Amino acid sequence: MRVVRVVRVVVAAMVVALGAGGAGPANPPPPACSDGQVRAVWIATVQNIDWPSRPGLPVADQQREYRALLDEVQRLGLNTVIVQVRPTADALWPSPYEPWSHWLTGRQGADPGYDPLAFLVEEAHARGLRFHAWFNPFRVSRQADPAQLVPDHPARRHPERVFAYGGQLYYDPGRPDVRDFVVDVVLDVARRYPVDGVHFDDYFYPYPVEGEELPDAGTFAEFGSGFTDVGDWRRHNVDELVRATSQRLAALDRDIEFGISPFGIWRNRSADPRGSATTGTQSYDTTYADTLTWVREGLVDYVVPQIYWEIGHPAADYAALVPWWADAVAGTPVRLYTGQAAYKVGSSPAWDDGELAEHLALDRAHPEVCGAVFFSARSLTTNAAAAMERVWSDQNVC
């Protein structure tokens, strides 16, 4: 939110001063959970994971499916939906920047005949649900051939802005014009639609593919002046995207939240004394997402680490990660929501119907945890249906 973000930046500066030996603020920042608990669900459109059920459905069927989905969200006592509106450098609204999504219409660039985003927001608000627009920042396509995109796609008009990696196509985060373009896309939605929040997922630089190097050596040579380490430069590029998005949202004459859902491990303690007692993939070193910087500088309103492991996991124990993330936001106005892997329920003995309820019970021991977000909507009515009934029946959890 615009006013809150200004306060948060001031508090972040005080926290930095305190760490440098200053006395710090006379009064601590307001409790992060003062606005109440968030109970949310991610609604994924890429690959038709959640909505619509397949590309090219008639409009009436698309709308019927979404209404039924929201009915279930309400029944489960959730209060927020985080809907993927830009899954692969495409759009679920009439965008002046990118083509209509083929996940929606069955053919990239094909007009669905209505404004889906306007409908999605209106239906959520009619039920008293908050609506956060979810953007994947840099993914262009789940295949690597630019010729498969519509002729007027920005990635074809500006081939210097993209690279192929791991069989997919990405915008190059090292280019300032790419970052400016992504923020322009986000602001188009923030200005035109009454969304309550803007949300980024965990895909910044692509996750590593064994045997492949990121093809950004030329970009580093052109734009990496002042950096000797390519990893530091890549983190700087992601930081710049987050910072620009935060600043431009804050300048709007309306309140809108900005949140990010990073991978659940920032760094392992073996690599950094500030890290968690884990031994898994590190977002700081793989997707170049430095979440601690975003929290310290007050660039986000909330974070939703994807803590997609069970209690007792040997490499990434949920019971170890929640207190680590709680400590990361402690003393700041940045709110913490835990990302919950509803899709894993039933996948192994560890993921029985009680695991999610145990997670949320553990969350309650940490006042910095202000809610939970479940991935994803389809799971709530399929494999995780019984687990969610247990969550719902425990009034102390929800």
Image: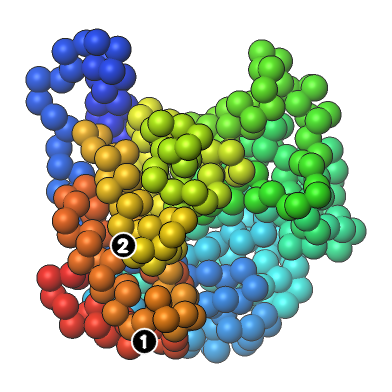
Q: Can the viewer see residue 125 in this picture? A: no
Say if 155 sits above or below 329 in the image. below
Helix or strand or loop: what does disc 2 sit on? strand
With 377 as the anchor, is 361 left or right in this view?
left
Quarter of the image where one finds residue 232:
top right
Q: Residue furthest top?
A: 21
Closest to the observer: 54 or 366? 366
Residue type, mark 2 in image: Ala
> Residue 356 location in percent, x, y?
32, 73
What residue is shown with label 1?
Answer: 385
**Residue at the image position 46 percent from the left and 56 percent from the top:** 315
Q: Can the viewer see residue 15 in this picture? A: yes
The local crowd at label 2, few if under 14, some if 14 to 19, many if 20 or more residues have their Cα within 10 Å, is: many
What residue is shown with label 2?
Answer: 372
> Is label 1 in contact with label 2 (beta carbons under 8 Å)?
no
> Which quadrant holds the N terminus?
top left
Distance CA(mark 1)–CA(mark 2)? 16 Å
With 257 as the anchor, is 284 left or right in this view?
right
Helix or strand or loop: what does disc 1 sit on? helix
> Residue 303 location in percent, x, y?
37, 48
**Residue at the image position 66 percent from the left and 17 percent from the top:** 227
Say if 110 sits above or below 2 in the image. below
Q: Residue furthest left?
A: 26
Q: Earlier in the sequence, mark 1 or mark 2?
A: 2
> Residue 212 location in percent, x, y?
80, 47
